[in-house]
Image (cartoon, helix red, strand yellow):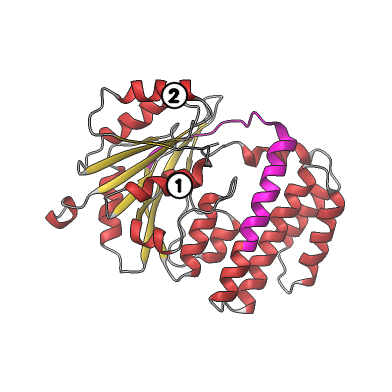
Amino acid sequence: MNKYVENELVSVIIPTYKRSDTLVRALESVLAQTYKNIEIIIVDDNARFPEIRRHNKTLIEKYPGIIFVENKENLGGGLSRNEGMKVASGRYVAFLDDDDEYLPEKIEKQLSCLVSQDEKAAVIYCYAEMINVDGSRYNYINDFEGNVLLENIEHCLAPTSFWLCSREKLLSVGGFENISSRQDASLLTKLLLNGYTVYRVPEVLLRYYWHSSSNGISNSSLKSVNAEKQYHLMFSKLACQKKISKTIIDKANYLFYFRLAREYVAIGYRKAALLLFIKMLKIDVFDIRNLRILCTSLFNKTYLFAASLKNKKRVGN
């Protein structure tokens, strides 16, 4: 790594909520990085659980130099990351969920990749080893690069633990949205709508842990419905401001309708899902794969269980 890169401070922001049992593992994975010019910021979102907050503070006492931010109220994962960026000193930032862990070369390899790109590059992501609660594992591999707006809307390129970013660029688009989920996808979409680009290091540099939601299918899906609506509204407003072409907007709307219709099916709102299905048919964008999936879900009750699987991971809260 060249001398210029070695002098760059990277701020790693770890939001934490009710996961004291895995926080130290996440923290120690940052301390074990081969790249050493790192600032660690833990944002404690346990305002409603003072005993957990006290325990977290005790846990990190043996790690000197850690910045510990205490949210005055429960903010959720996205806004907690924004709080971390407010106090960060690094030109570059990375995020780590409190139950995930970096592999040793993550920061070094992503930073080298980012500084080698042009000034439009905002985010570098990586591959990851996905670990399920039953112990099964598989690798998450995604190779989209550049200004891949529609690809990100169809399926989020990478969760926040995968990222290393330009702090200035993230702040320039307003940081994370105040929504209950889809925080990662919505911020990437804002960056891409503003002309920024994303790239990836094609190596597994992260262990990412999946967790079943304890809220049950109905609460989880209602939360997802509201988040999808907010995400779509944000996209629509910003796409209009940026004068995005009608063709791109139509394709994006099709993808938003498809995802929202699946969420409606998951909570039994089949009439609402059917109305969105009709909207999809009216858009001059034909995707037989998505239409087949949606038709199957509308008329197959077993789809309710399958739809719940997409909400395994709770980010922050």
The amino acid marked with disc number 1 is Thr
Q: Residue at x 61, y 57 (%)?
A: 231
Give, as a three-letter code, the residue at label 2: Ser
Q: Separation of disc 2 and disc 1 at Cα?
A: 20 Å
Residue 199 position in % (x across, y down)? 39, 59
The stretch in magenta equals 205-233
Residue nearest the viewer, comparing 205 with 121:
121
Can you give x and y, in whole percent of width and height, for residue 150 in the image? 57, 65
What residue sits 33% from the left and 50% below the top? 93
Q: Quadrant of the C terminus?
A: top right
Q: Which mark is residue 20?
A: 2
Left or right of residue 134, residue 45 in this image: left
Which of the numbered marks, if any, corresponds to residue 19? none
Q: Which mark is residue 160?
A: 1
Residue 210 position, x and y percent, is: 54, 33
Instruction: Categorize mark 1 by other alpha carbons within 10 Å: few (<14), some (14-19), many (20+).
Output: many
The one nearer the camera, 300 or 209, is 209
- Judged left or right of residue 43, residue 282 is right
